[in-house]
Amino acid sequence: MIRVVILGFGNVGQHLHKIFHETKGVNVIQGYTRNTTETTTKAGTPLISKISEIDSSADVYIVAIPDDAIKGFTKELKLKDKLVVHTSGGVAMNTISKKHHRGIFYPLQTFSKNTEVDFKIIPICIEAEKENDLKLLRKLGELISNKVVDINSSERAQIHLAAVFVNNFVNELYHISEDILKEKSLDFELLKPLISETAKKIETLSPSKAQTGPANRGDIVTIEKHLSMIEAELQEKVYMTLTRSILKRK
Amino acid sequence: MIRVVILGFGNVGQHLHKIFHETKGVNVIQGYTRNTTETTTKAGTPLISKISEIDSSADVYIVAIPDDAIKGFTKELKLKDKLVVHTSGGVAMNTISKKHHRGIFYPLQTFSKNTEVDFKIIPICIEAEKENDLKLLRKLGELISNKVVDINSSERAQIHLAAVFVNNFVNELYHISEDILKEKSLDFELLKPLISETAKKIETLSPSKAQTGPANRGDIVTIEKHLSMIEAELQEKVYMTLTRSILKRK
Ligand SMILES: NC(=O)c1ccc[n+]([C@@H]2O[C@H](COP(=O)([O-])OP(=O)(O)OC[C@H]3O[C@@H](n4cnc5c(N)ncnc54)[C@H](OP(=O)(O)O)[C@@H]3O)[C@@H](O)[C@H]2O)c1
Ligand SMILES: NC(=O)c1ccc[n+]([C@@H]2O[C@H](COP(=O)([O-])OP(=O)(O)OC[C@H]3O[C@@H](n4cnc5c(N)ncnc54)[C@H](OP(=O)(O)O)[C@@H]3O)[C@@H](O)[C@H]2O)c1
């Protein structure tokens, strides 16, 4: 049995709590959240809101708080020689206070409070200073996911950068296209089958094979027509930059 | 029974042929493709390769050939007072030779030869010069899809522009992220659950609600770290432009 304390009950903290609670071989002995009137979660896990009350007998402490709070928060922890990991894609392992055994348990997925995710397919990127800790994190990861990978901090930063492109930037393109449709009072719903198929295609085709459209076939007439239709300067910049990026590959 | 001739047997032509063949109430009486050694499709539809052989008794002629060939090709057709439609998002209806009754039958989806699609959820954007023709196109559309919409040429151009953002540009972001991972010999497979979840989120959340990440939370430290990690100039431009686009919304 792996005994876990989850520190921070936001998107990631709550999703981890839920999946660990459903999983044999792991026990969340405590959750920490700064402001709570409850003393347990709905699932019965004890909740605390004071750092001084943190149980010192767990195997691993998972810090799931905002990136910029990790450094200060882990410094304040009163633990001794304990494995403390964070869940961030963008933060180096050595940001965790060096008084702990340090590690990473980064689930490569986007979490929101009200959406269900299937942990089995989520890559869990792990890292640890000590071989034994890495083993424990691998064991913990494999209890919930089929894809646990050893990733060092510099690789993880690269993955996080790539993730910004396929997650935040892709979502911004959805947003721009919604804006473009709104201008003519057209319904964004119309694009949803295309959005879903575009993502689905990439499961079996490489991005290079999946590409189509005006830039890909060098159709300058259509590109110029589109540019003449766009009014907002930033939309035009986005159109130009991504069109150039596609043209450059030819 | 609606009798159809399909002119052009590429991605769209073949997908339409397949779904019409499976659908009651519509009969593909002929397919036209320039180079064929077969005289029928596998499904038994007669195939021809000469314009002079086109059956003049169909209710509708669907031209599914490259955008820039539509004008010349429809001029050559020897039909008289027949409904001739094209399937393009980016081409105005009046590009079709004016000797025909003109119309549009634009399936708003990305088609490739070897991927199956569910026509029921694909929006079919229709337009026609004559009210009767519009009725026929609506009837034909409703046989295969639950979402048939009246869209004029200027609205369709706007939809096509928006589609370029969520399809071609999104795919280019997948491509860039693959490039970024490759630099450190990391596997693009890692990002696939995130890609799929990002698209899935948009089914129930607006792009505005779904957004997360460094730009969205104004995390300049991470943005600068990312920019320092990017080597290719065009990748940097894409990062900057989309980051600005997100920051501008705050
Ligand atoms: N969301 C994602 O999609 C995702 C995916 C992968 C990794 N991550 C990483 O996971 C970590 C947590 O992200 P999240 O999305 O779960 O964040 P979140 O939803 O904002 O939750 C963070 C929680 O941390 C607590 N907190 C905030 N500031 C704190 C501070 N100064 N000291 C102590 N606790 C504090 C807050 O809980 P209380 O106010 O109740 O204390 C909050 O609920 C981050 O490192 C993030 O990069 C996020
Ligand atoms: N692919 C998509 O995702 C998609 C989605 C919605 C709408 N559309 C629109 O549908 C239309 C067809 O696109 P597609 O993707 O099916 O194209 P495609 O796969 O390139 O097929 C077009 C077919 O047209 C024939 N053709 C090519 N040049 C021709 C010419 N000059 N004269 C006569 N026939 C010619 C070719 O067949 P032969 O060589 O055998 O004659 C070819 O198989 C376009 O207007 C496009 O904008 C495409």
Image (tube, coloured by chain):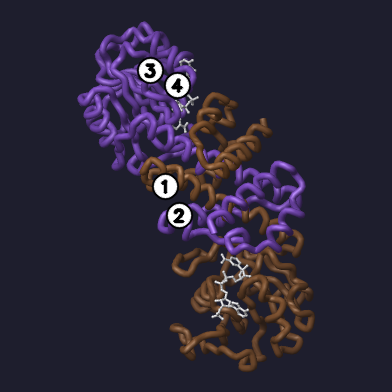
Chain colours: A purple, B brown
Mark 3 or mark 2, earlier in chain: 3
Mark 2–mark 4 distance (CA, rounded to whole Å):
32 Å
Task: Give the percent coordinates (x, y) of residue B186.
Answer: 37, 43
Mark 2 crowd level (few <14, some 14–19, many ≥20, 10 Å Cα) = many
Mark 4 crowd level (few <14, some 14–19, many ≥20, 10 Å Cα) = many
Q: In the image, B97: left or right of A131?
A: right
Task: Give the percent coordinates (x, y) of residue B206.
Answer: 60, 41
Picture quarter with the C terminus of chain A: bottom right
- Residue occupying the point 56% across, 70% down: B144
SS category of the residue bearing label 2 = loop
Q: In the image, B132: left or right of B25?
A: right
Q: Quadrant of residue A92?
A: top left
Mark 3 or mark 4, earlier in chain: 4
Q: Which residue is mark 4?
A: A65
Q: Which residue is mark 3?
A: A96
Front-lying residue, A225 or B209: A225
Q: Within 8 Å: ligand 1 and the Cβ of disc 4?
A: yes
Q: Amino acid at mark 4?
A: Ile
Q: Are marks 2 and 1 in contact (CB under 8 Å)?
A: yes
Q: Which residue is mark 1?
A: B192
